Amino acid sequence: MSRRGQGLYDWWSRHRNLFGRLYDIAFLGRESERRERAMESLSLDSGERVLELGCGPGNSFAALRTRVGSAGRVVGLDYSLGMARQARRRARDKGWANVHVLRGDAGRPGIADGAFDAVYASMSLSAMPESERAIEAAYRALRPGGRIVVLDAQPFQTFPWTLLNPVVVPLAKWATNWFPDTDIPAQLTDRFASTKVATFDGGVTFIAIARKSERTDDFG
């Protein structure tokens, strides 16, 4: 994430209610529905290890932890110091011993190859100036056969929704450090063995599910 992005999300970490209203607008009032569908797409089992890229204040932790159970592990990663602090506080206050938060760059997370069964990225990759590098890091962090689920946004793709892009795109770039020209689904397709994408609301939001090859030597 850029220096501007870090400062921006540090500011949002101190204004969480306003941040929530921003997502109400971004998801056109369907945030809970979209997040639930993305979470279900992870198909997490008890005991699995899941990494969340761009975890923000930890809003997804409860749902992730419920799915992996006490035997599993949830690790959240965020570049914003303010967001990482909020996420750590949430895990500590809830007493979630198997939820851990790292402050760092998603493109250089310092995580061992094959350490996770699943990766989750919600409204985060498109705010990274080098999302392709973050996707590569996620790929390497996954075990063979592991999967990544991405819930994210892009400019409206279908008419008449596209008429809103001249207004929506500049505002979203200003408010969230958004990189609207980044084609996250294409980047996932280029790196992973298989990718499926579902779009919603004129194509402005999408859920992408990508899976790594089962080959045990496939870390290159």
Image: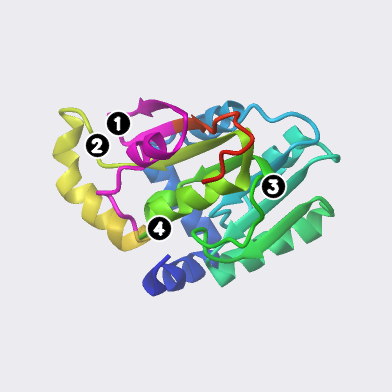
Task: Find residue 54 and report its horizontal and vertical position in percent.
Answer: 53, 55
Disc 4 to disc 2, C-alpha distance: 19 Å
Question: What amino acid does circle 4 point to?
Answer: Met
Q: Which mark is residue 203?
A: 1
Q: Residue at x 19, y 44 (%)?
A: 165
Question: Which residue is situated farthest in the front direction here?
Answer: 217
Label 1 vs label 4: CA separation?
20 Å
Which mark's residue is nearer the viewer, 2 or 3? Answer: 3
Q: Say which residue label 3 marks.
A: 115
Give the amino acid type for the residue marked by disc 3 in the picture.
Answer: Ala
Q: Residue at x 47, y 58 (%)?
A: 18
- Report helix, strand or loop for mark 4: loop
Residue 128: numbered disc: 4
Q: Nearer the viewer, mark 4 or mark 3?
A: 3
Q: From the image, state whether disc 4 or disc 2 is nearer to you.
A: 4
On the rendered image, what quadrant is the N terminus found in?
Answer: bottom left
Q: Does residue 41 sit above or below 97 in this rendering?
A: above
Mark nearest the camera among 1 and 4 is 4
The region drawn magenta spans 178-207
Find out whether the residues at labels 1 and 2 contact each other: C-beta distance under 8 Å.
yes
Q: Residues within 10 Å of mark 1 (few under 14, many from 20)?
A: some
